[in-house]
Amino acid sequence: MKILLILIFSSLLLIASSANQHQVKILEKIFSEISIGKDIKIWSDNQDILIGLTNNQNFSTTQNSKDANVIILKDATSIDKITENQTVFVLEYKLLSTVKKSFGALFWKKGRPNIVIVEPRIKMQSIEITKELEPYLEEKIW
């Protein structure tokens, strides 16, 4: 019985780890396809994501939110970490409405990743995107 529980627990950990790695790969692709006019330095309130993004050549990460120019938010409790000159990307769709400074979101719906980039917000923040991200542009938050 103990072996069965250990196998189930191990499987759940493996699945969770795989989903997190998939999310990190998508975020790497998104941030490789945008330009904010300077080198991208990322901070996230999710340490697993921050660690996963650490070895990317297109941008760097930081442990201090004040040193970052891009913030990845998973939780609304971290909203107070955002300063005026930082760009924000969220990991829940409802945070797009809550965090008016956010330009896009990566969230899971029905087991699939969804990407939304709000066109008026990227224009307002002078964020440039490549053609790769154009299919994810939305005029407004639904």
Image (cartoon, rainbow, N blue to C red):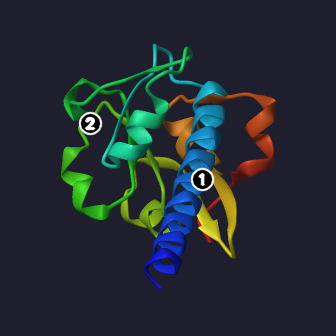
Task: Please give the residue where the numbered disc 1 appears in the rendered image.
Answer: 18
Q: Which mark is residue 1?
A: none
For the residue pair 99 and 62, the one nearer the viewer reads as 62
Q: Secondary structure at mark 1?
A: helix
Q: Residue at x 80, y 31 (%)?
A: 131
For the residue pair 96 and 65, the one nearer the viewer reads as 65
Residue 134: x and y, percent? 78, 41
What is the three-letter code of the residue carrying label 2?
Glu
Q: Residue at x 37, y 57 (%)?
A: 99
Task: Please give the residue where the numbered disc 2 appears in the rendered image.
Answer: 84
What is the three-letter code of the residue carrying label 1?
Ser
Q: Is residue 116 above or below residue 110?
A: above
Q: Quadrant of residue 21?
A: top right
Please indicate whether residue 44 sits to the left or right of residue 8 in the image. Answer: left
Q: Is residue 81 above or below residue 111?
A: above
How many residues crowd mark 1 within 10 Å: few (<14), some (14–19), many (20+)? Answer: few
Q: Is residue 67 above or below residue 99?
A: above
Q: Nearer the viewer, mark 2 or mark 1?
A: 1
Alpha-carbon distance for marks 2 and 1? Answer: 34 Å
Sooner in the amino-acid sequence: mark 2 or mark 1? 1
